[in-house]
Amino acid sequence: MKVNNETKVGSLALIAVALLILGFNYLKGTSLMNENFNLYAEYADIDGLTAGNKVLINGMQVGQINKLQFDNKSGKIRVDFSITEKVPIPIDSKAMVFSSDLLGSKAVNLILGKSQTILSDGDKIQDSMAMTLSARVEKEILPLKDRVESAIISIDSFVTGLNQVLGEGNRDNITASLQNLRKTTTRLDSVMVKVDHMVVSARSIVKNFEKNNETINKIMKSTAGFADSLNAQSGRIRGIITRADESLAHFKSVLNKVDKGEGSLGLLVNDKVLYNNLTASSKSLDSLLIDVRRYPKRYVHFSVFGGGKKSK
């Protein structure tokens, strides 16, 4: 049986159309061989999501966006998508729209819940919206911008103050301050040299103490023994001090009586007439002794035979 050319052309055209449909669906991610599991979600803003975008679970593509439709009653956008993989999706799962790359391509990420109840074909899933790249940048850049502006203001204030400090009127003061600082540093160096010498001397003293440690210990022991002996004799010393106090008190009472003219010594000290008489007698006695020395024969004469003359 011969096949005519028209039949051949028609068969080739059908095969080409079938291949075109299969290739187009393959490129869209739609599998004609598997049964699709359809869900939908309603969003107030889809941020540029389009039909044909991927549906992911933990980064793996499990479906695609089929249709977008605006709801006039609610003012929201209904997004229908199909799940090609046999993945159980709990009822508390969420469909989150997010940017899948740096170019801003959108996709839906299914965040699986923990409920034991599984969504059925055609059910509604909770919507969710990830923070956009611009929102993230704004969130992170705005605080940085504020800090940069604050830093710029601080730098400007610092530069202004520095210009005032480094002005012509203050240059001489700064130069003088630097010179004083240099002098102070020089003095400090000399002081540190002296301190080094003092440290060396202190070390030598410590070494001498270490060498004479036994002698110092003996001196300390002797001092401790002397202190013990002094402590043992403290009773006797206390008695001596007491007796000395008593003697001083008695001597003081005697002096008080002498001052008052009591007793012979008091009369002798305080009676002026007696004092004057004694003084006169002392002078007369002194004159007599002088006269005796000059003229002893007037007062002393003797004779061996008892017949001597008296001198006049």
Image (cartoon, rainbow, N blue to C red):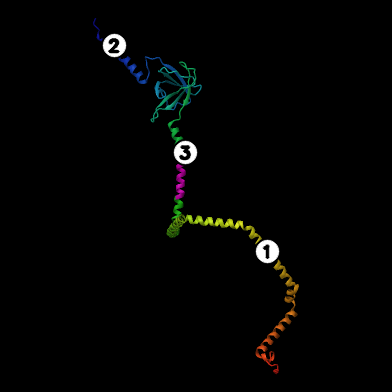
Report the number of numbered marks: 3
Which of the two labelled residues, at mark 1 and mark 3, occupies the earlier sequence position?
A: 3
Residue 180 picture quarter: bottom left
Measuring from the top left, give residue 244's x and y in whole percent.
67, 64
Q: Does the magenta run of residues contain 306?
A: no
In the picture, the quarter occupied by the N terminus is: top left
**Residue at numbered disc 3:** 143
Residue 188 vs residue 28, the one in the foreground: 188
- For residue 11, which numbered disc appears in the image? 2
Query: Pointer 1: what residue?
Result: 245
- The span shown in magenta is 143-158
Residue 278 position, x and y percent, is 72, 81
Percent coordinates x, y for residue 107 in the rendering = 41, 25
Q: Earlier in the sequence, mark 3 or mark 2?
A: 2
Q: Provide the secondary structure element on which disc 1 rests.
A: helix
**137 horizontally vs 226: left or right:** left
Task: Give me the C-alpha separation between circle 2 and circle 1.
Answer: 152 Å
Residue type (three-letter) at the residue carrying disc 1: Asp
Disc 3 and disc 2: Cα gap in Å? 67 Å
Viewer can see residue 297: yes
